[in-house]
Amino acid sequence: MSYRLPVTRWLAAIALLLALLSAFILSPANASASINYGDEVAAMAKKQVGSSYKYGGTTPKGFDASGLTQYVYKNAVTELKIPRTSRDQYKTGKTIQQKDLKAGDLVFFATGKKGQVSFVGIYYGNGTFVGATSKGVKEVKMSDTYWKEKYIGAKRVIKQ
């Protein structure tokens, strides 16, 4: 059993196939993966949870607070170099209200002298941040009494 199509239908089918193929091959690729730098920074910070605390530490072998944030920003896809100390990090970026925090923002606290920045963490989302505490790198709730009372402000150093 064989099917016979008139020549005009064969030509129409071939023309349609060629049109579809050329449209597929020649059209610009519109599918682009958009990186959310804030989420990527937060994810990189979360990977450091469990690392030890080390005064002056700047590597996964041991971090202090600003060493962690500096390491994460430098080694995340942002490859952003930020200052070494929490006090200097507080001088960079755009000031963000707590209600407007997004993943990857820097959050600052006065854990020493009242009103003076002495600690920094990376906002993770859902009211938590990742920071190098004296007990190592942890994910911490900002609503915990200790952190809530010491909160100073937040900065956004990457475009989101």
Image (cartoon, rainbow, N blue to C red):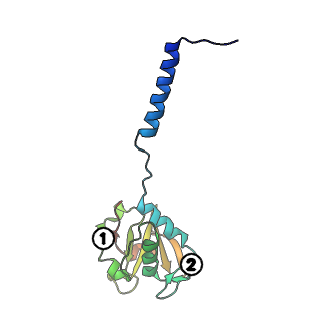
Question: Quick check: can you spot residue 124?
Answer: no
Query: Tags 1 and 2 in contact by the CB under 8 Å rule?
Result: no
**Which residue of the protein is positioned furthest toward the right in this rendering?**
1
Name which of mark 1 and mark 2 comes first in the sequence. Answer: 2
Q: Secondary structure at mark 2?
A: loop
Q: CA distance from mark 1 to mark 2?
A: 27 Å
Quarter placement of the C terminus:
bottom left
Residue 54, position as x, y percentages in the image:
52, 86
Q: Secondary structure at mark 1?
A: loop
Name the kind of residue labelled 1 in the image: Gly
Q: Is residue 34 visible?
A: yes
Image point 47% across, 24% down: which residue?
A: 16
Q: Which residue is at a point 38% across and 82% down the rendered structure image?
A: 84
Name the residue nearer the viewer: 66 or 115. Answer: 66
Q: Residue at x 45, y 52 (%)?
A: 33
- Image quadrant of residue 49? bottom right
Give the vertical position of 1 relative to 123 (above or below): above
Residue kind at label 2, given as amino acid type: Ser
- Judge by depth and name the residue closer to the eye, 16 or 140: 16
- Provide the residue designation for mark 2: 51
Q: Indicate the quadrant containing the N terminus: top left, top right, bottom left or bottom right.
A: top right
> Of 137 and 16, which appears nearest the observer?
16
Residue 6 percent location from the top left of the image: 54, 11
Counting other residues with Cα less than 10 Å from the Cα at mark 2, is it few (<14), some (14-19), or many (20 or more)?
A: some
Q: Position of residue 41 (x, y in %)?
A: 45, 66
Residue under numbered circle 1 = 93
Query: Most extreme residue toward the front, as rendered?
Result: 7
Q: Residues within 10 Å of mark 1 (few under 14, many from 20)?
A: some
Name the spot of residue 79 as percent of width and height, x first. 41, 70
Residue 118: image tag: none
- Identify the residue at horizontal 39%, vertical 61% (top origin): 102
